[in-house]
Each structure stands twice: as structure tokens, then as C-alpha cells.
Image: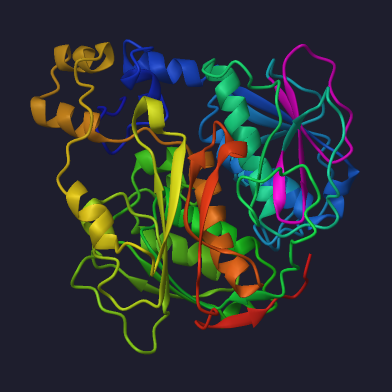
Amino acid sequence: MEAILDNTNLHRTAKYFMDSGRADTHEEAIGLLRHFGLTVHVGPQIASSAHHQTALLTLVNVARRTLLGGVEVVGLPDTPSISPIAPATTLKDAVRGLGAHAVKEPKGRWPSAVIGEAAVPKSKLPCWRLTWSGWRGGVIPAYVGGSLDENRAMALAPLIAASACAAEAFAFHAEDHLMAGRRTSGLSLWQPGHDWLRDDETEAPLLFLPSHLWLIGLGNLGQAFAWALTCLPYSDRNKVQLVLQDFDRISASNESTSLLAFPTDIGCRKTRAVAKWMEGRGFDTCVNERRFGAWTRRGDDEPGVALCGVDNALARAALGKPGYGLVVEAGLGAGPEAFRSLSIHTFPASRSPEEIWSRQVGEATGNVENMPAYQALKRKGMDACGLAQLASRTVAVPFVGLIAGCLTVSELLRRLNGGCAFEIVSGSAAALSAVEAVPISADPYGFGHLAASKYF
């Protein structure tokens, strides 16, 4: 029997088509997503390059949650996984475990992506080449040709390339950006807003990594933080202390947005699911299953740096209360017009968290209950409370959360490795080249660090 639709099992990308009025029912919105797919072609580098494997696994994970038609991978060899994302397994098993299919020939009539020196398919549909170098990553239309020096890259650069590819593929399928498939799209984590295709002599090698962190909120953003941290070249992850804080459980709806939420985890505490995943990759974790708020206090022996990924204004306004030495907060846009938007705030800054978010507490979001998809649910018998809960959920996609997650983690990495500190970084996955960043003067990073096992 089909489950009754409610806020716990709503596919958060299907909501885009419901809220914009492009789908008259939830079933129609899901039907649209089931026509979205991606074919990924991998070259021989995939067998020996951890960066290429990480790019592939990341692309599979973010794309298959949104492109419900499927993700297929062509040219995948029988080779061990050497990506920190999937230790002690084969690459094929890791790809399958994340929800993609390894095939010898393309089966879907979908746009495609190329990782490494794979042959570009002959097709009129878009094909994106993932590429990265230094602190920069993105995609180039395959017909344009060229790539960056992928041998010399910071560990998060391939994640940006994968996220940019998923964003462009979704925009192409959704037909909401005319340039999708015809433009480059990428980002510099060293200097957001600068030309990501140009070599940047100011980029520093990644010598030091953060060792003590408190993650607040383990949904879309919090799990993106965890994914990004796992990709960093720690020599001994057991020396990394992580406090994981969230009071909620994983629901079916989370599976559409959050990188570490799988069907087998539904009903589990988010803290425990994320802790299990990260401990399986060597990290030392401590879970806190209390709701974060003005009552939260940091102990002297607990991490002094917090990465925050909650969508609650009251909780955000309280970020100055626990006594952290540094807070990096990430937020995502909502609604059909702004779901690709993202912003990063750091504290201490020119304004306190309370000054920024206290005015937003209790602020109403746009009402979409008059859209045809919601009226159809009302006619089927959904009561006013259920309709309001459903309508209040935000549109969300995993690739925007991962871009924001990489920017959040890279704020710490820049400060640790002689780069610029930023008070605010804001932009959109629809226009990564237009991301804006506001520099701030910051004290030297003094919250615990470890040496990186490799610099680039």
C-alpha cells in the first residue's frame, strides 16, 4: 500500500515543481523527476586517483537523490576503492551502494558527464567534463575541450566539480536555465568569486587540518560537513574529536536531500547514523541529542569551533551563547525561486548572531497552499494541519548543501593555512562565478589542528 503523503516522506525536490505550479499533483512532480538521469563516463585515472574516485562517488551520491531516472557509470573497472569516502571495498561496490548502476554501454538517453580521460560521447545532449586544480573545481562543456591540472588539488575541489555537474544536470532537465550545458560552472574555495579556471599563485598547500569540531544540525548541511571532512587528508582520523548535535530522527524525506541518509536509516537518530558512518572511517565522535538553543553551553574540554547547519532562526540567534571561539554558519535559500541560494556567516564578526536572526524568529514563509498540487491534496482529504506542515517544508537539493558545506569547511582550512578569512560568503549554485565574499580580520586559528598527510 502506498504511504500517505506527509511532511516526513515528501521528496524535497518534487516540492519545487509543486510550489512553482509546474506540477498539478505530487505524483506528477515525482513523474518529472523520474525522467531525469545522468550517464557518467570514467577514464583510466579512476583506478589510481583518489580524487577521481571521490569526484565519482560524490557525483553519484548527490545526483541520484534528485535525478530519479537513475545514474549509470560507463567504463568502471574492477579496482579497489582508494577514496576515503569508501574504504575497504571495491569501487564498483561503492558506486552501487550509493545508488548508481555500472554498465558497459549507456542505457539511458540522458545528458552525460566525463571524469578523467574518457571518450566524449557523440550526442546532441549536454556533456560536462569535471575538472579541478588547487582549491578550484567545476565543469566545462565537453565540446569546449580542455581541463585543469587534476594532479595537484586540494581534497574538496573534486567535490565542488561534482556538485556543479549535478546542479547543471538538474537545471538542464528542469529547463529553468537556458545556459545549462552550454557554460562553464565552478568555484574557487580559496578566493570565492574569482575566476576558477585561472591558475592562482596565491593558493597555499594544505598543510594543516582542524582537529576539534562541534557540528550543530545533521540534516542536509550537517551531513555535507561530514562528507567534506571525510575527504580531507588526515593521517590519523582517530585524533579528530567531533561533537555531533541533533535531536531529530532520519525520515524518508531526508533521503532526498542528505548525503548520509539511506532507506535503512529511516527512524534512526541522525546523530547515531552520522556517527556510525564517520566512525567507520576512523573519526572519534561524541553525540549530543539535545535540541540546540540559548541554554547550550560548551565545556572547557569540548571543541571551540562550531559548524552550524540548522534552518531555525531561534537556534541561529543563540550561536553566540555557548562560548565557541569560532562559529561558521551555513544557510540555504527556500522556495522555488531561492532554493539554489546559499550563505555562510562567521563569528565573531561585525554583527552578532542575535542581531542577524532575532528579527526572523517566527517570521512566516511564503504560502503555497493555493498551488494546484496542494489543492489536489486537500480534495483527497488532507486536513488543514497536514496541508500547512507540507507547505511549510522548504524546497531542497543535495548539491547546493554540499557546495555550502565545502565553503564552510574551507573557511577553517584557509584560516589554518594562511588564507583570507571571510565574514560572509553568499551566492547561488545557478551562478557560482558570481559568489561574493566579504573579508574580515581574524586572529590566528587556535582551536586545535593536525598536520595533513599530503599537501595537494
Relative to 162, 441 lies left or right:
left
The magenta segment is 111-138
Residue 43's place in the image compared with 343, above or below, is: above
303 in the magenta segment: no
Quadrant where the image shows the C terminus: bottom right
Residue 208's place in the image compared with 74, above or below, is: below
Residue 46's place in the image compared with 391, above or below, is: below
Nearer to the camera, 129 or 99: 129
Quadrant where the image shows the N terminus: top left
**Residue under the point 19% across and 13% down:** 375
**Residue under the point 62% across and 26% down:** 169
Residue 91's place in the image compared with 302, above or below, is: above
**Where residue 126 sits in the image (x, y, percent)?**
72, 19
**Can you name the residue that lies furthest to the left here?**
384
**Where residue 37 sits in the image (x, y, percent)?**
61, 24
Relative to 149, 344 lies left or right:
left
Relative to 366, 233 lies left or right:
right
Q: Count every numbered label the image shows and give the total.
A: 0
Relative to 410, 45 lies left or right:
right
The image quarter containing residue 237 is bottom right
123 in the magenta segment: yes
Residue 19 showing in the rendered view = yes
Nearer to the camera, 141 or 116: 141
Nearer to the camera, 357 or 29: 357
**Where residue 42 sits in the image (x, y, percent)?**
81, 38
Nearer to the camera, 49 or 78: 49
**Residue under the point 33% across and 54% down:** 310
**Where residue 109 sits in the image (x, y, percent)?**
69, 15
